[in-house]
Image: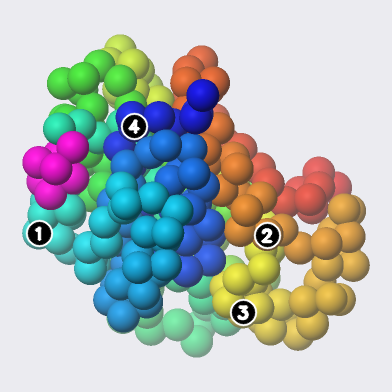
Amino acid sequence: MMRLQGKTAIITGGATGIGRATVQKFLEQGANVIFTDINEENGRKTCDELKRVSENVMFIKHDVQSEEDWALVVSEANDKYGRIDVLFNNAGIFSSKPIEDYTIEEWNRLMGINVTGVFLGMKHVIPIMRNKESGSIINASSIAGLKGAPNHALYGASKGAVRIMSKDIAMEVAQHKIRVNSIHPGVIQTPMGDAVASGVKLTTEQLASHIPLKRLGTPDDIAHLVVFLASDESTFITGTEMVVDGGSSAR
């Protein structure tokens, strides 16, 4: 039996990278997927490609900082399928430079996408999940939300906020059988992973050599974990952080 058969999921940042891989895995496991992205061209192209996997996929252009956009996405998902079982708050951006080089505008943009977007997604989805007395919310944080690193003040602050907010909301909604967990990838083979390598002045091959498993993660490595957390196999897991980093943070 497919692990997500009959479940309906919203996945943000779904046009590329981890988001795209997760949309595909969800479709393969029988889910109905509404995925969103700020890049409409990439989103529509991805949607057309993934319809070869399943017709139960829909794309909506979406700025996660916009409460109006969130209300529209959640309303369309609920109207189409009558339920929302899973929310994967995946959309995010990366930045790395000394703190004195940042402007307040850069702070507001990064926090708006990485933190406000997660808050708004949970705010609008939880009432629907509460009506069904079930649901799984997975919030994308990072190992940068668990430990410090130079030039990561903004990014680390945003991912640390996601980690703690996930725990707070997990306690708030546990009585309604809604689970909330954060995931903490290390460096993944995506454009964001390339940016991480560039920020520490290493090639991706050099960066991989510092990871205990001697490779970078792949989008599928993360997607498999999200499928697990979305499925009924993880119904006793909430309020925790799941690290997927090849052993980097175990040192």
Name the quadrant containing residue 78: top left
72 horizontally vs 204: left or right:
left
How far across and how far down the image is residue 185, in percent? 63, 53
Magenta span: chief secondary structure: helix
User: Mark 3 is on which residue type?
Assistant: Ala
Separation of residues labelled 1 and 4 (CA atoms): 25 Å
| Residue most extreme to the front | 52
Q: Residues within 10 Å of mark 4 (few under 14, many from 20)?
A: many
Front-most of residues 241 and 97: 241
Q: Report if the CB atoms under discs 2 and 3 are less than 8 Å apart.
A: no
Q: Report if the CB atoms under discs 4 and 2 are less than 8 Å apart.
A: no
| Mark identifier at residue 195 | 3
| Residue most extreme to the top | 175
Q: What residue is pinned by disc 1?
A: 68
Name the quadrant containing residue 115: bottom left
Mark whose residue sits in front, 4 or 3: 4
Q: Secondary structure at mark 3?
A: helix
User: Mark 1 is on which residue type?
Assistant: Glu
Q: Secondary structure at mark 4?
A: loop
Q: What residue is pinned by disc 2?
A: 218
The magenta stretch spans residue 30: no
